[in-house]
Structure formats: C-alpha cells, structure tokens
Amino acid sequence: MKKKATINNTPVCQMRMQAISDSMSILSGKWKFHILGTLIEGDKLGFMDLLREVDGIGSKMLSKELQDLEMNRLVNRKVMDTKPITVQYSITEYGKTLAPVIDALAKWGVDYKRSISGK
Amino acid sequence: MKKKATINNTPVCQMRMQAISDSMSILSGKWKFHILGTLIEGDKLGFMDLLREVDGIGSKMLSKELQDLEMNRLVNRKVMDTKPITVQYSITEYGKTLAPVIDALAKWGVDYKRSISGK
DNA sequence: GAAAGTAGTTTCCAATTGGAAAGTATCAAA
DNA sequence: TTTGATACTTTCCAATTGGAAACTACTTTC
C-alpha cells in the first residue's frame, strides 16, 4: 500500500481558488452585492436614492462602500452642478461584467427561499 | 413638472435584492466560497485535507464554517469508523446547485486579475 | 427665518470576525 | 514510550465591521 498522496494538487484548482479569493476581497462586506445589483438595474441613482433603495443601509456604510466600489472601477461618481448639488452614481462598463455573478447569486437566493419556505 | 417619483420600485427588483441578501446571509464570511469550491472539485475530503487545501485557514475557522455549511445542508459530514477516526466531508446535491455562482465568481476573479496585472 | 432636501462626515460604541496557540482524546507505528 | 496522525475545541486577544445619532454645508421653498 502506498501512503496517501497529497490529494488533488492540480494547478488548475489552485488558480481557481485564488480567483475566488481575489473576487471576494473586492466584493466582501454586507452591502457590495446589494449596491451593485441596484445600480445594475436602475442606472444613475443619487446618494439619497441609494439610501432608500438599499434596504437597511446607513449613510456611513453607503458612503464607504461606494468609495470602495469607485476605487475598484466598478461604479462611477459624477457630480452634477444642479441647484442643490446632486451626485449620480452608476455602474461602469467593467462593473457590468459582474452581472453574471450577481444574477447567479440572485437566482440561487430565490431557489433557496423556495426550498426552505414550504413548496 | 411632477415631483420626483419614487424611483424604480418594481416588485421584481425588490425580490431580486432580497434574494441576494438571503444568499449572502448563508455564504458570508471569509471562507465559505473557498471551502465550497474545494469540495465541489475534490469530493470526500477529510478535515486535515481541507486544512491543507484551503490556504490560510485555521482549524477553528474551518470547524466553524463546516458546521455552518452542514447546518444549511450544503455539505455532508460522515464519520468513518477507521482505526484513527476519520471524517469525510463532501458537498451535497443541494450544495452543487451553488456551482453556477461559484463558477461565475471564479471566472470573474480570473478576468479581474488579468485586468489589473497588465494585459 | 425655519424647514426640508441635497450629500455626505464624524464620533462613539457594540458586536462580530478571525487568528495563534494550546489543549483534548483516540489510536497506531517506531 | 515517544512521536505523529486523526479531528476537533477552547481560550485569549486584536482587528474589523457596522450601526445610531449627530453634525457640516449649501440651497431652495414655505
């Protein structure tokens, strides 16, 4: 009998796992997916719009998360010179590449809910 | 001029956002996706296998995360009556339904890496 | 001049997260 | 009998996360 080999150390697998960690390092936190999902659906939302749309978030978190997302080129921040100054947040083209991830997550969430609450 | 209507309050959108929150409430934390991804690739891994495969995790976290995942019926825990007791962790059929989410996340992570580190 | 709406920032605090290290318990091989 | 391997658990602690509330600052409306 041979001794147990070090399981599947295929480089493919390692890369994949690293990729997952990379994604999550950017998308971690309680609100990122929610904010991105909202911006993908309704483009060009103001700060107060987002505060109302993203259920439960406070202004501090929203501000911080938007800064994170902006830094990672996932959302755009555009200051409009309107009478009371307004800001338009929108998803970037690059941010839109996250749509498959968010769609998959939303789809799974719906199925999950169905699986627990009767049916 | 009308006053600004309450933006897109389509029920579809609300449901979608709720679904995302539901998913994330189960998949939150630093390690869940990593562990699930590992178990989807290589089935039937022992505790120590996972400790080695999931880069950087400690035994406390691994133990806790596995309990969470087991509670949510995403992974199976099977105690084998071998000489030194061993445990086999594997993904459940239900856990496999997360494959599209994890695949999308991994795919995005690969593209992300490419987009930052030069071409 | 007070109220309300824009877009945040700041402070203060509590809870959660997560890591290192050591400990528990069992069994087998050297 | 000491070492090593399995599978955890416990303790202790530091860092991070996140929320409530108050505050800034500017402008328009009542």
Image (tube, coloured by chain):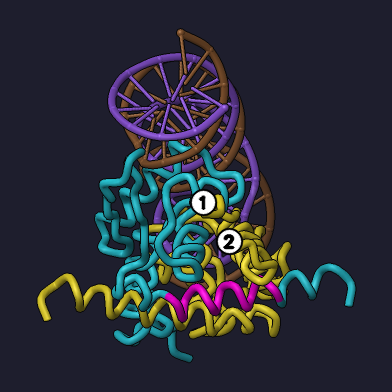
Chain colours: A cyan, B yellow, C brown, D purple
From the top left corner, tell me how far across and down residue A87 is, in percent: 34, 49
Rendered view: D1 above or below B49:
above
Q: Identify the residue at the far right of this view.
A: A118
Q: Is residue A106 left or right of residue D1?
A: right
Q: Report how many numbered discs are placed on residues in the image.
A: 2
Residue for point 48% across, 91% down: A1
Tell me whether the residue at label 1 lies in contact with that at label 2, contact meaning CB atoms closer than 8 angstroms.
Answer: yes
For marks 1 and 2, give the CA distance: 8 Å
User: Residue B91 in magenta?
Assistant: no
Amino acid type of disc 1? Lys
Rendered view: A84 above or below B59:
above
Amino acid type of disc 2? Met
- Of all chains, the one bearing label 1 is A
- Decide: few, some or many residues near mark 1? Use Cα within 10 Å; few <14, some 14-19, many ≥20: some
Residue with the mark numbered 1: A30
- Decide: few, some or many residues near mark 2? Use Cα within 10 Å; few <14, some 14-19, many ≥20: many
Q: Is residue B109 left or right of residue A71?
A: right
From the top left corner, tell me how far across and down residue A19 is, in percent: 33, 74
Q: Secondary structure at mark 2?
A: helix
Rendered view: B42 above or below A33:
below
Q: Is residue D2 left or right of residue A106?
A: left
Q: Which residues are magenta?
A: A99-110
- Of all chains, the one bearing label 2 is B
Residue with the mark numbered 2: B24
Q: Secondary structure at mark 1?
A: loop
From the top left corner, tell me how far across and down residue B45 is, in percent: 55, 77
